Image (cartoon, grey):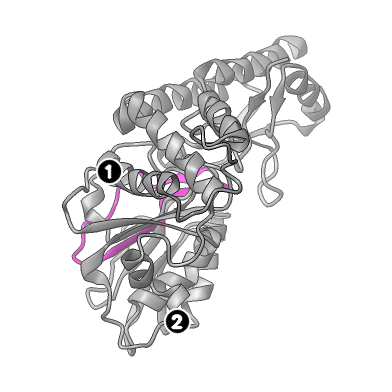
Amino acid sequence: MKKHNFSAGPSILPQEVFEKSAQAILDFNGSGLSILEISHRSKDFVAVMDEARALVLELMGLTGKGYHAIFLGGGASLEFARVPYNLLKEGGKAAYLDTGTWAAAAIKEAKFFGQTEVIASSKADNYSYIPKGYTIPADADYFHYTSNNTIFGTQMQQFPDTDVPLVCDMSSDIFSRQLDFSKFGIIYAGAQKNMGPAGATLLVIKEELLGKTGRAIPSMLDYKQHIDKESMYNTPPVFAVYTSYLTLQWLKNNGGIAAAEAKNNAKAELLYNEIDRNPLFVGTAKTEDRSKMNVCFLLKDEAHTEQFDKLWKAAGISGLPGHRSVGGYRASIYNAMPIESVQVLVDAMQELEKSIQ
């Protein structure tokens, strides 16, 4: 039976990416060596790294605009500390928006480096919405926020207009919608949701922001070191980078971000329409802030849980339970998720409704 993978991450990737990466494990580029054992300094892999970094900037429309794309290890969680290390000046301050678990984790790390001001938070309402109407301090060294919150199913639909450098954790919605990426000073994302397997982190940075903190930065934590060494300061996560490269190629060959956004909108509309129509279900996020990547919803009557669980499992659906802090269900519908799989979930929801009437 075909599996419909709604996992929040590590998550679904395009089938052709699985097939090409699987072949590379056996024989990479006809070298007779596996991608798992190839030297990261080899001509073939250096080409992969160079092309992957170039593809990132091309897809974002940032080529030739003073930005660098680098691949790092440590996951997006390491960037919670690396961002203030590289941007928060001695005696300066950083501004943060608290919209969920990962935003709160970033705030916690920033406090080790200096003054950190949380300018707005939705924590009191279990992060069910994105705060609005806040003021970004003009003297902040940067403003950090998370564009999409996987656990709570909220997503920023509008981005602030400010002269303060914007730093955005786009781990769960990168490459999913068209944005003016030149408005951002730093974008970072763990690969394991929309781009590749766990193990690689993408960082896109405007170089003019660096070198202004007044502090010495350990080499492994210094963005400038990784830029100068073209993501090869130390051995990179070779397989994760290669699989991300294949996914970026797939994205480009299938119409780029614009085409992905159109498909993502259609998937989200299909599922949210059913949640709103079906009397057995209710969404957890405020309507205006609903995520198009992570759709969180509940059964209005938990007595139907066992029956619904049997239905979606029998349909071949995997990874649907919500995070323990929210409960209910979470359907993650990243770029590689086909609309046909979303329809399978909708069918299961409708089947439950029919069985109860």
Q: Is residue 117 visible?
A: no
In this rendering, is residue 257 above or below 210?
A: above
Q: Quadrant of residue 231?
A: bottom left
Determine the secondary structure under disc 2: loop
Q: Which residue is mark 2?
A: 218
Q: Is residue 268 magenta?
A: no
Q: Residues within 10 Å of mark 2 (few under 14, many from 20)?
A: few
Q: Does label 1 or label 2 sit earlier along the sequence?
A: 1
Q: What secondary structure do most residues of the magenta stretch adopt?
A: loop
Please give the count of numbered marks on the rendered protein: 2
- Marks 1 and 2: which is nearer the front? 2
Q: Is residue 230 visible?
A: yes
Q: Is residue 152 magenta?
A: yes
The quarter of the rendered structure image containing the N terminus is: top right
The magenta region covers 146-168
Distance Cα–Cα, label 1 vs label 2: 30 Å
On the image, the x and y values in percent for residue 119 come to 38, 69
Q: Which residue is mark 1?
A: 60
In this rendering, is residue 20 above or below 68?
A: above
On the image, the x and y values in percent for residue 116 come to 41, 78
Q: What amino acid does circle 2 point to?
A: Pro
Q: What amino acid does circle 1 point to?
A: Met
On the image, the x and y values in percent for residue 118 come to 42, 71
The quarter of the rendered structure image containing the C terminus is: top right
Q: Residue at x 27, y 46 (%)?
A: 57
On the image, the x and y values in percent for residue 266 come to 42, 21
Q: Residue at x 66, y 19 (%)?
A: 349
Determine the secondary structure under disc 1: helix
